Each structure stands twice: as C-alpha cells, then as structure tokens.
C-alpha cells in the first residue's frame, strides 16, 4: 500500500532526483518511487515557485493586434530555427566528448567550427568562457611542448613499469627514474601516469561493516537459514553495507527487509556506522508497517545490533531479536545478496560514486524502485509492493 503522507525530506529528495536526470519524465520518476504522478508534479511546481522560476500570473491577458501576432509568430519561427541549429551543434560536439579532458574537447570543437558558427555563439552553447578559449589558443605552443615532455616521460615510465611486472606505482617509479639519472618530481610522475592510464598493482581495501563486541550479549538464532515467512510483518532481516564515494570516502546503508514479500520496509543512510544508523532503519520499517509488534528481526552479530540501545529500540517496537553465528555470512545470506545486487546495479561496474550527492540520489532512486518496480523471481516476477497489494486483495 502506497504511503499517502510524505515527510519533507522525501519530497525534497524526489524533486532532486527528478532534476538530476535531464531528459527524464515526471511519470517515470513517480513510478520508480511509487508516488502519484500529479503529487510529484505538484512538488516540482512548488519547488519552482520557491526558486522563482515560475512567475505568478498577474491580471488578465489582453488581445493583441494581428500584426503583433504575426511578428511574434515570425520570432517564434526564427527561434525554432536557432534551437534546431543549436541541437545540431550539440550533436556534432558530442563526438568530441568521447574521452580525454572535457573542457579541452570543448575548446577544440570551438576552434574547429568557429568559422561557420562564430566563437561567441559556440562558447554560449557549450557553456565556456570566451576568455578561456582565447587563452587556450594563445598557449597552444607551450601546451604542445609540455605534451611532448609528458609523452617522453610516459615512455620512460612504461619501461620501468614493464620491468617490474606492472606492480610499481608512482612512488617506486619515481625512485627508479631517480636512480637512472632522470630527476623528476613524484607529483609529475603521478600526473603522467594518470594521464596515460598507467596503474600499479593496488590491493582493494576491504571495508569491514561487521565489528563484533566480544562482551555483548547475543540473541539466539530464530531463523536458522530459513529465509521465508508465512505472512507479512512476521520476519525481517537487517544488515549494513558500505557505499564507496570518491577515492577514499564511504557512506553506510542499513536495511530492514520483510522475508515474506522481500520488501525493503526500512532503510537509512549515513556517513557513520554508529548504532543510530540501524535504529533509524528499524524506525523507518515501523513507520512503513505501522507496527512491528511480534515480528522477528534477524541480523549479524555486529556491535550495532548487539548494543543495548538497539535492544531497547527492539523492545519498544515489540520486536524479538535473532542473530546469526559469528563469522557465518550464510546465516544472513538474504541481506548479503540484497547488498550485492544493490551495489552491482547502482555502480554498474564503477569502483565508486563520484560524490556523496550522487551516491545518495542513486541509492534513493534504486531503493524505492526496488520496492515499486523491480521484479523479483521469488514473487512471480512481481515487485514487492505489487505482491503485497495483490495478497491484500485476495
């Protein structure tokens, strides 16, 4: 059943998700999030008014003379021609953006097409400053010399890299170059390696989200690897996973999943793994269901779940705690599988999200889409919300 009362944070995130995806429609975003299309449209209108982008109508509209109408029609036709030409320019420019430095590619496109369209117009369409373009042209000779020097250094780096089976990163490559008599700054070596995509062997850091507290009391295993439930709101599994952001940053996602419908009943995202994170996810599930009284909450033995604060939250909600064995991921396999699917489908092969905003919006969209749109093989290829609505009708 779709929630009719949406908190301000949900409305703001929904509008932000719509604005972050150029070319999408309100209908598709509303369907992904499981909200009424007109409801989302009204949120967008209110946000437009707050931004001052939609002027409020004042007074009536007076009829205009025929000559004025003809002039306006001519102006509209002229503007349509301009927009069509600008669309063609952007299509041509898109071929320049396949790789490399995006700004340099824009400059190069302007240089190649300035005779036909003019520098001023091209810079406006591509959203670059004319002064920057002219500076780029004026420094072409210096840039060519620097590129030649970088290419020479890259060749030296590749020799060192190959000699050591591709395992050396910038610090060791710099030391090898110094020893061979080529004095170069390690920052320049790192920059050239990035530019020419020369990478040393780097072990991927594994992020541990289950940190046990040996002194904590653990609940018995009430699930026993039976990840089913006879009805809704009887059994839940919870877990924490990490979201890689940028080079070294992380966000953390706590989830609460109903074992009968596989619905993500509650979730929370934060930049920490404190107990508040899992309590917030449990509270979100309680809001979704109205009550969790009598339900089982199965988790791993992480310190967040064995804490007194989480136990108190479960007691208040009427939830019985259940915990997997120490060091056995199979005892919470459903949550582990959910986390793997979530990261695979949001990152789509990338190592990390670009920044925190992208991570939060991508997660917001996927987690709601998981409930309202994404088909589940265990539910007869229905989404969890559709499945729940259908069993309520029976």
Image: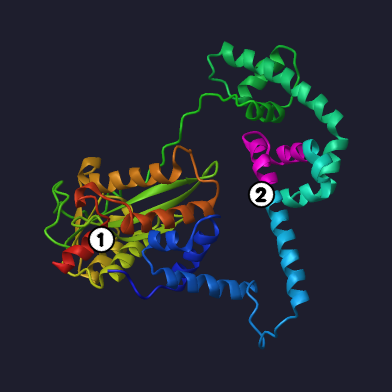
From the viewer's perspective, is residue 164 above or below residue 376? above
Report the side of 88 relative to 36 (left or right). right
Residue 233 appearing in the image: no
- Are the residues flagged by discs 1 and 2 in contact, CB closer than 8 Å? no
Residue sticking out furthest to the front: 66
Q: Judge by depth and name the residue closer to the eye, 302 or 349.
A: 349
Residue hosting label 1: 386
The 10 Å Cα crowd at callout 1, few under 14, some 14 to 19, many 20 or more, is some
Q: Nearer the viewer, mark 1 or mark 2?
A: 2
Residue furthest left as drawn:
230
First along the sequence among labels 1 and 2: 2
Numbered range of the magenta stretch: 87-110
**Left of 160 or right of it: where is 72?**
right
Image quarter of residue 192: top right
What is the quadrant of the C terminus in the image? Answer: bottom left
Decide if residue 253 is in sight here: yes
Name the residue rendered at 20%, 52% in the picture.
379
Of 262 and 226, the residue lying toward us: 262
Q: Which mark is residue 372?
A: none
Q: What percent of the width, then of the height, locates residue 205?
A: 45, 36
Residue 105 location (% of width, % of height): 71, 37
Tell me the tag on residue 87: 2
Give x and y (percent) for residue 216: 26, 54
How packed mark 2 is, by other alpha carbons closer than 10 Å (few <14, some 14-19, many 20 or more), is few
Label 1's element?
A: helix
């Amino acid at each position: 059943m779709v929630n009719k009362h949406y908190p301000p944070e949900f409305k703001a995130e929904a509008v932000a998700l719509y604005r972050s995806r150029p070319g999408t429609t309100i209908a598709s975003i509303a369907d992904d999030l499981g909200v009424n299309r007109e409801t989302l449209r009204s949120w967008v209108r209110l946000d437009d008014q707050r931004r001052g982008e939609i002027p409020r109508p004042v007074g009536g509209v007076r009829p205009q003379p025929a000559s004025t109408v003809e002039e306006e029609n001519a102006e509209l036709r002229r503007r349509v021609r301009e927009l069509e030409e600008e669309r063609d320019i952007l299509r041509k420019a898109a071929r320049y953006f396949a790789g490399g430095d995006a700004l340099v590619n824009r400059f190069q496109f302007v240089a190649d097409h300035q005779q036909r369209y003019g520098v001023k117009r091209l810079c406006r369409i591509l959203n670059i400053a004319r002064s920057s373009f002219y500076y780029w042209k004026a420094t072409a000779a210096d840039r060519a010399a620097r590129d030649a020097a970088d290419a020479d250094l890259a060749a030296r780096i590749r020799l060192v890299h190959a000699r050591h089976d591709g395992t050396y990163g910038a610090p060791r490559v710099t030391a090898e170059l110094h020893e061979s008599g080529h004095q170069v700054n390690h920052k320049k070596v790192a920059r050239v390696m990035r530019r020419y995509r020369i990478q040393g062997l780097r072990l991927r850091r594994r992020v541990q989200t289950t940190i046990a507290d040996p002194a904590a009391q653990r609940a018995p295993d009430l699930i026993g690897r039976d990840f089913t439930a006879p009805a809704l709101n009887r059994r839940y599994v919870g877990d924490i996973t990490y979201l890689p952001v940028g080079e070294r940053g992380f966000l953390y996602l706590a989830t609460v999943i109903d074992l009968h419908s596989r619905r993500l009943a509650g979730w929370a995202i934060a930049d920490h793994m404190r107990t508040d994170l899992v309590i917030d996810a449990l509270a979100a599930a309680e809001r979704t269901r109205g009550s969790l009284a009598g339900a089982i909450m199965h988790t791993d033995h992480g310190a967040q779940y064995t804490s007194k604060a989480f136990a108190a939250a479960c007691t208040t909600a009427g939830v019985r705690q259940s915990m997997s064995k120490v060091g056995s991921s199979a005892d919470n396999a459903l949550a582990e599988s959910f986390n793997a699917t979530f990261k695979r489908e949001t990152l789509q092969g990338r190592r990390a999200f670009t920044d925190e905003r992208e991570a939060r919006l991508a997660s917001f969209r996927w987690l709601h889409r998981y409930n309202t749109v994404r088909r589940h093989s265990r539910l007869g290829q229905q989404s969890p919300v559709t499945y729940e609505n259908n069993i309520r009708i029976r």
